Image (cartoon, rainbow, N blue to C red):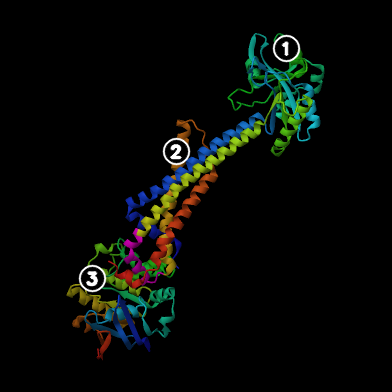
Amino acid sequence: MIALSSTFKISLRALRVNKMRSALTMLGIIIGVSAVIIMLAVGKGASDRISKQISSIGSNLIMVLPGSTTSGGMRMGSGTQQTLTQDDADAILKECPAVWDVSPFVRGAAQVVFGNQNWSTSVIGTTPSNLNIRDWAVSSGRNLSDQDIRGATKVCVLGQTVAENLFDGRDPIGQVVRIKKVPFLVVGILEAKGQSMMGQDQDDTVLIPITTAQKKIIGRFFPGTVQTIMVKTRTAEDLPRAERQVNDLLRQRHHIGPKADDDFTVRNLTQMLQVAEQATNVMALLLGAIASVSLLVGGIGIMNIMLVSVTERTREIGIRMAVGAKTWDIRLQFIIEALTLSMIGGVAGIVIGYVGSKVLSSIAGWSTIVSPLSIVLAFGFSGLVGIFFGFYPAYKASLLNPIDALRYE
Amino acid sequence: MELIEVENLSKIYDLGGSVVRALDGINCSVNKGEFVAIMGHSGSGKSTFMNLLGCLDEPTSGRYLLEGVNIGNLTRDELAAIRNDKIGFVFQGFNLLPRTSALENVELPMLYRSVAPRERRELAMAGLKAIGLEGWEHHHPNQLSGGQQQRVAIARALVNGAPLILADEPTGNLDSKTSVEIMEIFVKLNREQHITIVLVTHEPDIAAYSKRVIRFQDGHIISDERRAA
């Protein structure tokens, strides 16, 4: 049997003889591979962005919002009615087995002042569990405590943006800031969290005990009512069950008849995003599948050229057979030739695909991620294409009758 | 000692209804060290006979023993191994690989029997030198004269140490002076290395170099003459 290195040399020489033809044949594979790489990169970029959004709002999350009011036949937006209470939140935690943790909150805009600095930010009155629910933590100091809630103490935890704007590098902990002229002691600083899926700066916030907020800061609420209740489950699988349980419990607590509409809304944010993520994944796969069709077409180009090459070199095949080339020596020669074409095309396609997706993300502003898997996939696939489409011409060549091949003009 | 033994060998082509008996029941044997010329008009069956002897084609019926091995029972790959091992071909049209140096053409048979690259190179160099082509190793066939190309082909035929050389009108494309040179190489190989040579020709002065002349006509052997060299 002929050594592989010799076969490889023979193949390279044969490809060099017809440079233009080899290059054009490779072009088919190059386009196919780079299209696969780019499409997968675009898809991966999109789904990655969505999963980042999921983790930034916190995972396994359900939002319970109050219902809308109707004024003169016109329905106002969700949350215009104040139907959710602290007691509802406590009841959800106690009575819904699928629920792991709850955090009610009220939110309002307020001016926060420290010394001669001031900053307008979103003040959130909430419970200590808020951080657990949003997969958040303090970077220094401490979180709000249950004592803070019970005692309606005037303490606050600052988001990174607020801390930077008011304190400009100094340590805010132990300092007193004024929120709507009420002095609050800074007890903690939150970790940086970045933008939300809507593009809001989530670090531009101040957390204070919900009780304090209701009494002193965000006065438009009836005592005991909350704006939103965040509900968290342990796993994503618990989400639909928790959604149902919360729904049933609140209908019961709010004495809503079987036919009447809910006076609240339960929104499964994580699930919505997961659906979006799945859709993007399907989209990415679809794009990849379409791109791989062009890879297939490139493969057929290889087969075409290899068939031509076998016919052109019939005499060469005859000579090789006459001096002792066996069936597999001939097959291997042509398979390796096809494989060389497709592999060189594959490598070039990977490079072009990689560069192309970088260019795409800088020009179109799409986030693209070229995953190592897609490179391995594209490379492996182009190799398979070479072997698959090289085999038939090689097989044909190997079946030639030596004397017919030698006499071929 | 018989190198070639042929019994009742036939080759029949079916050309769309008309049956052509290219070879019709040939019996003959060739001993080791013989120098045989096969003569006949075109269509006499001499080339078909050569192709069968060279294991390039399969007979319709009959037996062919090469060094006592029945060729009829062998697979394609076993035939390839026999060609590689026992037979060296010299063709009228040289049949060298184009765009490939003389050296690599001579290396070709060794490529298919896994000789190490360095040894391959050394053997091919020695073969070219022995045939008087030292210094032409890296020329491609289209840079060589007809006589030189045929020498490369002879070097290729010899490089695996085959006991049998089959030459199909080796001087057909050469001028008379070069033909003499090539024939002298064959005579020398036969005399000094005792290589069996079977040569097809239709020129009597080429056949005159041999020790035995077999004449073909219409698929039959019509004469088989030996003469003292």
Viewport quadrant of the N terminus of chain A: bottom left
Q: Position of residue A304 (x, y in %)?
A: 37, 56
Residue drawn at 35 percent across, 49 percent down: A24
Which of the chains bears the disc numbered 3? B
Label 3 belongs to which residue? B147
Check disc 1 and give the amino acid type: Gly
Does the magenta portion include A220?
A: no
Residue A356's disc number: 2
Chain letter behind tag 1: A
Separation of marks 1 and 2 at Cα, in angstroms: 55 Å
Q: Callout 1: 10 Å neighbours few (<14), some, many (20+)?
A: few
In the displayed structure image, the side of residue A308 where residue B113 appears, left or right: right
Would you call the spot at circle 3 few (<14 residues within 10 Å), some (14-19), or many (20 or more)? Answer: many
Element assignment for label 2: helix
Dot 3: what SS? helix
Report the residue marked by disc 1.
A219
Q: Which residues are magenta?
A: A308-325
